[in-house]
Every structure is written in structure tokens, then in C-alpha cells.
Image (cartoon, rainbow, N blue to C red):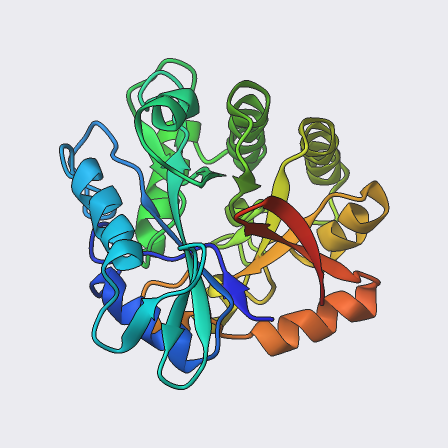
Amino acid sequence: MKFNLHTHTRYSDGSDEPEKYVEEAIRQGFHTLGFSDHSPVPFENNFAIREGMLSEYCKAIQDLVNHPPPLLQERGVGGEVLHSESGYEVNILLGLEVDYIPGLTQSFEFYRKNYPFDYLIGSIHLIRKSSSDNLWFIDGPDIEIYERGLKEIFGGDITKAVTAYFHQLNEMIITEKPDIIGHLDKIKMYNRGRYFSEDDEWYISLVDESLQLIRETGCVIEVNTRGMYKKRSEALFPGPEILKKILPLKIPVTITSDAHKPFELSLLFGETKKFLKEIGFKNQRLLTLNGWTDIRI
């Protein structure tokens, strides 16, 4: 059973109309495709849904369910399934990847109350130091932005910077309770062994604290393949050692590709499933019309 709950379209920083992703999902024999464009943020940027466009994004996804593209036949009995001429079917879900920036971004409850989202992914891409207006951007294709922010905002102190990341992550987990935690250890992406080691005791302690909070709140952790197929990370998000900690804690996981182009929908899924099985995982979690359920890997 193939599914992906982390997908970006042209409404944020993806490449294509949602319809193109559905067509590719059907071609690949997907069971479920979840859209999760970036939530609006209150400053100029080139990655999030623009202010005032969120309702249009929601309508575009819902229109795919109500009015399937020519490639698709009529909806199935019950109204939840789209069928292709080849016999494949795909469930379409409306999600949102919400950036959590304390004091700047809307609460997750705002999105839950005012829009028909099926689920919310909570992610940290920009770190706010205390009440400062300066933000450390830890994502994107330009490593120089990461390094400049580390120097200018945290004085080059990587321990303080990484601690700020995990404290912001923990605050999001406690106050917002996302359905899915996005790329848990994203902070490692541009580190590449230069500033800290993932074996450092202080780093392990920060990870352990976050995992306990995730366990207590019941969030799902995504196993994100994008860093690897984009060659920005040598390991999955989260990496092997964290995954080994997640297993005995019985925290549910779901494999995602964080796709920004249709052909990326299932990149490295086969290798990731094999790796998870080697660690000892037997299931991953899927959102269905009847709620969350575990699916054999």
C-alpha cells in the first residue's frame, strides 16, 4: 500500500497544480495522497502560501475530490475514492504544513477551526531567539543563509542554536499538538558533522526530551526521505539512532517524501521501508476516512 501525506504544490513552494500530483499518484498505484502546502507566514518569503490564498488552496484540493480530472472516472460509492481507467484508486486528503514561530504564526487551533483540514504537520524551518525579530532559517538550498544566521543570531554558538531549535520544537508539541511532526531532526541538515556530533551527550539529551513529549501527546513522526534524495543529508529525517529510540517508545511513524514535484511522490520509499524493517518496525501509520490506522510495512 503506497501513500504520502507530505506534498507541496504550486500554492507554496511546489512545482505543479494539485491535479498533476493526483495523476502521478494514480499512475504509481497510490492508495492515499495527502496535500500539505506551507501555511502562510507574516513576512515576505518564497515558500509559503500567500496571505489570502489559503481558502483557494483548500478549494483546489476539495475540487479534485468533487470534480476529478479527465484522467479519473467518477467517484466511488461513499464519495471518498477516485478511480482511474487502469483500476487504481486514490484517497485525497487536505492537509497543511504549519510553520511554528512563537509570537509570529497563527495557532494550529486557528487552522483547525476555520478550515476543513484533515490533518496538520507541525514543522520548524525558522528559529526565533527569545523575543528577537531575527529568524534563523535552517532549510532551503542555500547553506550560506544557515551559516550567516548561526553567526549573526547565535554568535556562532551551535549548542545555543540547536538548543533553541529543540526548545521551539518542544513548545510546538506541547501547545499545538500537531497530528504529524515534520522532519524531527532537520537541524542536522547543514551541520554535516562540522559543528556538532549527533553522538554528543547534550544533543542526545535534547532529542530524548522531545521524543518523550511526542510520546505523551500522541503525535505521529514522519520518516522524511527528501534530505536524502535531494542529497542534502546522508540520512533520513529522523536519522537511524533516533529511529532506534522511537521503536521501543512505540511512537507511530509514517513514511513521507516531502514531495515538491510529482515524480518525487514516493522517492526512496522502498529503501526506507526495508531500513525500517531491519530496525524492527512492523507498521506505519495512515490517515483514513475512519481515522488513523496502522498499515504493515
Question: Which residue is more in the foreground, 37 or 163?
Answer: 37
Residue 263 appears in the picture as rendered:
no
Residue 68 appears in the picture as rendered:
yes
Q: Is residue 30 above or below residue 99?
A: below
- Image coordinates of residue 106 in percent, x first then y, are 33, 22
- Image coordinates of residue 158 in percent, x first then y, are 54, 37
Look at the image and tell me in which quarter the C terminus lies. bottom right
Q: Residue furthest top?
A: 131
Q: Give me the residue at 45% from left, 71% from top.
A: 89
Look at the image and tell me in which quarter the N terminus lies. bottom right
- Image coordinates of residue 74 in percent, x first then y, are 31, 68
Count all numbered tags in the image, as a single digit: 0
Where is residue 18, by image quadrant? bottom left
In this rendering, would 104 be left or right of 112? left
- Image coordinates of residue 173 in percent, x first then y, are 57, 27
Question: Which residue is more in the foreground, 52 or 80?
Answer: 80
Q: Is residue 60 above or below residue 270?
A: above
Where is residue 181, by image quadrant? top right
In this rendering, would 11 be left or right of 232? left
In this rendering, would 100 be left or right of 51? right
Q: Residue furthest front?
A: 77
Where is residue 217, by image quadrant? top right
Q: Give me the residue at 61% from left, 64% from top.
A: 235
Question: Which residue is more in the foreground, 60 or 166?
Answer: 60
Q: Give me the residue at 57% from left, 72% from top.
A: 269
Q: Give me the residue at 57% from left, 25% from top.
A: 167
